[in-house]
Image: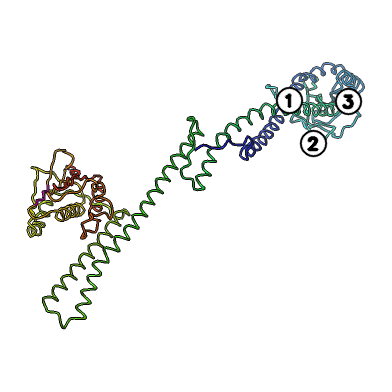
Amino acid sequence: MQFAKPKIFNRLYLQVSAIFLLVLFFFTAIVLYVSVESARKYSIEVNQQLNRELAENTISMLHPFIKDGTISEDGVKDIMHSMMVINPIVEVYLLNPEGKILQYVAPDKVVKLEEVNLAPVKSFLDDPAHSIIYGDDPRNPGEHKIFSAARVMENDQLTGYIYIVLASQKYVSASQALLGSYILGLSIRSIITILIISALIGLLAIWVITNKLNPIIKGINEFRDGHLDTRIDIKSDGELDRIGLVFNEMADTIEHNIQELKGVDNLRRELISNVSHDLRTPVASIQGYAETLLLKKDTIQPKEQEKYLEVIYNSCGRLKKMVEDLFELSKLQAQQVKPHTEPFSIAELVHDIASKYRIISQKEGISINTVIAKDVPLVEADISMIDRVLQNLIDNAVKFCHKGDTINIEIDTKNPQKVEVRVADSGQGIKQEDLENVFQRYYKAHDDHQSTGLGLAIVKKMVELHNSTIQVFSQFGKGTTFVFELPTAKRT
């Protein structure tokens, strides 16, 4: 089926595109955050590594002002002020061995802490890997900054520490302002670049995908609306085309099942029609003769009464047989009956059935013969089902034979794994146009008013339950042959 050309911007495309753009914005923000945070940490690490020896170098300048454990405050302040002039971003603190701030040089002389935690200082001095280490910021309690530190020694004894904060408050404020400006510029440039490239590629890819999905969705909608002949054109073997292929297979299966259901419904109607007609005849006979016996029982002779009763009895038997066949076929079709297979002698079963039917057939002048090969192996089957199959086939043969005709039941073992069973008669045969219908449910020949039309349908279903098939060969006026196979029993 041909489909109208889909719209360029359909609902599915817009929905998927909106989700794609949201995800794109989200990941862009994450990338920006990671990039800026990495740049900040990199700047901090570089600053600490470059100025790691700053405090150690300062010690050599302070030694002349340290005598007998006493530090000359004026000399130290002059040196510290000189350092601030040379490097205004640092803050220099002189600590005693316990971390108390003795002297400091800091912008605006604003220092809020009286002592510095020495744990980060000792970690810094004992760290061979030169990791990033943060220490107290005396001007901002609770905050931590990178630093450089060195021990102040005199006569191999610790007299204090030089503690230099490498990023003063002014430096941090200026750095944050520059970083904000950098982030803003980087954000705008990155977002525009990433969004333009990614959006163009992504939206194009989404358009291609949704454009392929449009015929599939349209086909599904049309199939849902009752157009069962709807199929999707397959142009390649891609993943989306495989969806269309699966849909086509599903549609074929559904359409086939619907046709089967229609056929079953037609058969059901035919069954009701046939059964109602077939039941009406014996019921009418039973009712008519029973009514005659009741109304005229005083005037009917005993022999005539016996004749009426015989008709009633035969009609009841026919009615019973019809109902039994209906129930049996219904159970077989509903798969409520499973074969209980066991090894048994098919030759003995054929002999028994033939002996039983000879009594009946001799009255009609029909001969029943058995032709059984030597050393017939046991078969693996349900003996009661095979017994029913053979009886139905012989019943069918007797009905279409006349006086002087013969019925042969043959067993052949040409195939070592199968036993072939044939039921052949020399009766009137079946017309070629009727051959394909003989196993149909409720089918019966036009001139057969005694049959329920279910016997051969039951035979076919029972043979199929043994994973086999039954075939029929016939020439009108010359006879009919039914053939089926049974598996041989496994030797133990």
Which residue shows up at 46% across the image and 36% down it? 245
Amino acid type at circle 3 is Val
Q: From the image, which quarter does the C terminus lie in?
A: top left
CA separation in Å, label 2 and label 3:
20 Å
State yes or no: residue 176 in magenta: no
| Residue on which disc 1 sits | 39
CA separation in Å, label 1 and label 3:
29 Å
From this view, report whether residue 157 is shown above or below residue 142.
above
The magenta-colored residue range is 405-409
Element class at badge 1 = helix
* Type of secondary structure dominating the magenta stretch: strand
Mark 1 / mark 3, whichever is N-terminal: 1
From this view, report whether residue 225 is shown above or below residue 156.
below
From this view, report whether residue 37 is shown above or below residue 338.
above
Q: Quadrant of residue 420?
A: top left
Q: Position of residue 317 (x, y in %)?
A: 20, 66
| Residue on which disc 3 sits | 105
Q: Position of residue 266 (x, y in %)?
A: 36, 54
Seen in the image, is 340 located left or right of residue 52?
left
Q: Quadrant of residue 67?
A: top right
Q: Nearer the viewer, mark 2 or mark 3?
A: 2
* Colouring scheme applied when the structure was drawn: rainbow
Q: Nearer the viewer, mark 2 or mark 1?
A: 1
Mark 2 / mark 3, whichever is N-terminal: 3
Amino acid type at circle 2 is Gly
Element class at badge 2 = loop
Element class at badge 3 = strand
| Residue on which disc 2 sits | 142
Mark 2 / mark 1, whichever is N-terminal: 1
